[in-house]
Amino acid sequence: PLRAWREKAHAEEGHQHHHGNQLVAVSFADDAPLVGERVMAVIESLGERLVRAKGFVHLAGDDRKGFVERAGIRTELRYLEPWGDAPRRTELVLIGDGLDDGAVHRALWACRAGAPC
């Protein structure tokens, strides 16, 4: 069975110890509009470590829902129906080998419209 957990620091050793080949699930949610090309670049930058990604993206300058999906080596950003009255919110889940939760969040926050590249 597939298991996902976060890497843990071993305080008694005085340094962070990472276990290889452990799948980590990172959830990201943000109300700010994101630049689609930047989101895709972040996802692609994770390379083969990223096993799966899926979720909705509040795209800057577009009234439609964005839907990101990565399965295997294929990554896609599709444009769906307009948001309408639904709250516009990015909600993504990324699953991969040894993903750093904080680094993924910082990279995706940098995708906000108006944020420096």
Image (tube, rainbow, N blue to C red):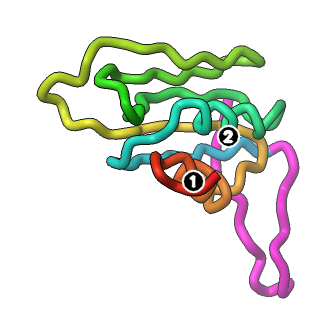
User: Is 32 placed left or right of 1 in the picture?
Assistant: left
Magenta residues, start to end: 1-21
The label number, if any, that marks residue 58 in the structure image:
none
Question: Quick check: is 41 in the magenta stretch?
Answer: no
Q: Amino acid at mark 1?
A: Ala
Q: Quadrant of residue 42?
A: top right
Relative to the observer, which residue lies in front, 98 or 47? Answer: 47
Pointer 2 residue? 42
Mark 1 neighbour class, 10 Å CA radius: few under 14, some 14 to 19, many 20 or more: some
User: Is 88 placed left or right of 11 in the picture?
Assistant: left
Above or below for 49 versus 19? above
User: Which residue is rendered at x = 72% and y = 42% of the image?
Assistant: 23
Mark 2 neighbour class, 10 Å CA radius: few under 14, some 14 to 19, many 20 or more: some
SS class of the residue under badge 2?
helix
Secondary structure predominantly adopted by residues drawn in magenta:
loop
User: Which residue is rendered at x = 71% and y = 66% of the image?
Assistant: 8
Above or below for 30 versus 70? below
Pointer 1 residue? 110
Q: Amino acid at mark 2?
A: Val
Q: What x and y, as percent, mark residue 77? A: 54, 19
SS class of the residue under badge 1?
loop
User: Which residue is rendered at x = 60% and y = 16% of the image?
Assistant: 76
Q: CA distance from mark 1 to mark 2?
A: 10 Å
User: Which residue is rendered at x = 66% and y = 46% of the image?
Assistant: 24
Disc 1 and disc 2 in contact, CB within 8 angstroms: yes
* Quarter occupied by the N terminus: top right
Q: Quadrant of residue 70?
A: top right
User: Is 107 placed left or right of 91 in the picture?
Assistant: right
Relative to the observer, which residue lies in front, 36 or 19? Answer: 36
Q: What x and y, as percent, mark residue 112? A: 48, 49
